Amino acid sequence: MTTNFDVIIIGAGSAGLAAVREVRKQTERFLLINDGPYGTTCARVGCMPSKALIEAANAYHARNKAERFGIRGSEHLSIDVAVVLQRVRALRDRFVGRVLKATDAMGVRSIAGRARLLSPRQVAVGDDILETRSIIIATGSRPVVPTAWQALGERLLTTDTFFEQETLPGRMAVIGLGAIGVEMAQALSRLGVDVHAFGKGERIAGVSDPAVAKAVRKALEDEFSIHTGHEVGLCATADGVRVQAGPVDIEVDRVLVAVGRKPNLDDLGIETLGVSLDKRGLPPFDRNSLQIADLPVFIAGDANADASLLHEAADEGYIAGVNALASEPTRFCRRTPLAIVFSDPGIASVGQRFSDLNEAQCLIGSIDFGSQGRALTAQRNQGLMRVYASADDGRLLGAEICAPAAEHMAHLLALAVERRLAVHDFLAMPFYHPVLEEGLRSALREIAGKLSHRRPDLSACEAYQAEALD
Ligand SMILES: Cc1cc2nc3c(=O)[nH]c(=O)nc-3n(C[C@H](O)[C@H](O)[C@H](O)COP(=O)(O)OP(=O)(O)OC[C@H]3O[C@@H](n4cnc5c(N)ncnc54)[C@H](O)[C@@H]3O)c2cc1C
Ligand SMILES: NC(=O)c1ccc[n+]([C@@H]2O[C@H](COP(=O)([O-])OP(=O)(O)OC[C@H]3O[C@@H](n4cnc5c(N)ncnc54)[C@H](O)[C@@H]3O)[C@@H](O)[C@H]2O)c1
């Protein structure tokens, strides 16, 4: 095979494939190397199968609202979990299939094998040593499983193994209350599993605003048990797993471990780059160019542990792909931070989180969805949104959200933060009635009321102070 390339891309995930797309606009002298299953983490064991599971769980859960809507007979509904899981896998196969077409179409430019760096311009795959002008590391991440728990064998699941299950046990513990833990714990509970969820710290789904965090906890605790603040101990019993955490001592059938993900950088030969590594084994890199130090090596996606989200992996693949062949790397302006957890109510953060704020210099507006008009009509009246703006000029800084339709309002807010809109600019936009976004408008109006200046336009139009109208 050819052993001299312009760019070698390591990892055929979302970041690696985005990089290939950019690289091949400039050269066909590239090589994509992937170790392990193809199809991307997102489509195979991540975003997509988890959302397919959540949708089924939510559809079944909707029966709990039927009686109050006046719909009779919902108590006769039942769920066939095996069929739910079959559907998840069928959709997963469809999504993966589409991705495989892209790698298959690359022919000899895509090879399977474990890549190892030998220097900033050399990569080994098996016995082959390949020379290249530049390298893109896009090796993704994998679930962290503490060594002590590995002895649990098949009783311990991660999202890498969960979606292969034919059915679900009666009792499960979910360890870790980040995005994965929250999404999976709620879905499992809605599918009829008796769920106990455990978090190490008090933060749930990454929410830093204490008021929003309280709303998150309240909403989730209505559905399953949450235990936080204690170290979790797991040991095998005759039929299952004993879970101990502070005063809690229970037995479950299976454990889903979701305590974070680790970049796939070990055994990659990253030390051959000659740069100092931090305590997580990560090299220094510029998040705007993705260049490692001043080397012709770029690191994109979960591999750099910066923002482990699909849209960020796609952006980073693009940046690395553009820069890998450039004489001088471009430093790209990154997008406004946006993170969404697909729970119900949804959880989201946009721009600056509460923990990032200088509280003395910002104004906060909030809306409790417990009494928001449209949310009440749909029995979706749960949650709290807090919006942050600069006290100087009302410019929107960010928000933390636990609300119905959080995913949509988060996008609207992201646009406003990205465009550097002030609260008054946002309030000058139309808000239809009755919509959940009127809740967002209430939070914005609260901030506007605290600002000294008013604009002589419709942004000054005030609320009725009536839940049916706001
Ligand atoms: C359960 C779950 C749900 C998620 N849900 C969402 C969501 O709703 N929204 C969202 O934005 N994000 C979500 N994410 C995160 C998102 O899936 C990831 O951020 C994204 O898939 C990362 O893409 P990547 O290209 O960096 O890595 P990957 O897609 O993992 O690709 C890396 C590839 O590199 C290969 N590789 C590793 N080491 C080597 C080596 N030495 N040589 C060659 N190849 C190697 C791997 O086998 C893999 O094929 C979720 C993740 C999980 C696990
Ligand atoms: N909707 C989404 O966008 C979505 C969904 C799923 C995953 N993801 C991405 O996947 C990545 C991984 O998700 P994750 O939830 O595994 O990681 P995470 O880092 O977001 O959360 C892990 C949680 O586990 C806790 N934890 C760590 N050790 C523990 C222990 N020993 N016992 C109990 N709790 C412990 C941590 O305090 C943390 O709250 C995230 O970075 C996220 O961006 C995104």
Image (cartoon, rainbow, N blue to C red):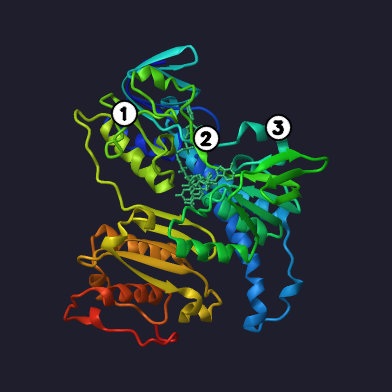
Circle 1 residues within 10 Å: few <14, some 14–19, many ≥20: many
**Label 3: few (<14), some (14–19) or many (≥20) C-alpha neighbours in 10 Å:** few
Q: Which residue is mark 2?
A: 38
Label 2 sits on what residue type? Tyr
The numbered disc on residue 151 is 3
Q: What amino acid does circle 3 point to?
A: Ala
Residue 381: where, in percent of width, then height? 52, 75
Q: Position of residue 399 (x, y in %)?
A: 37, 62
Q: At x 50% / y 15%, what residue is drawn?
A: 126
Quarter holding residue 448? bottom left
Residue 309: where, in percent of width, then height? 43, 46
Q: Nearer the viewer, mark 2 or mark 3?
A: 3
Is there CB contact under 8 Å for labels 1 and 3? no
**Separation of residues labelled 2 and 3 (CA atoms):** 28 Å
* The quadrant where residue 209 appears: bottom left
Closer to the camera in the image, 23 or 158:
158
Mark 1 = which residue? 292
Distance from the alpha carbon under mark 1 to that under mark 2: 26 Å
Quarter of the figure that contains the N terminus: top left
Q: CA distance from mark 1 to mark 3?
A: 37 Å
Is 189 left, or right, of 307 in this rendering? right
* Ligand 1 is within 8 Å of the C-beta of the residue at disc 2: yes
Residue 134, above or below 453: above
The answer to whether residue 366 is above or below residue 246 is below
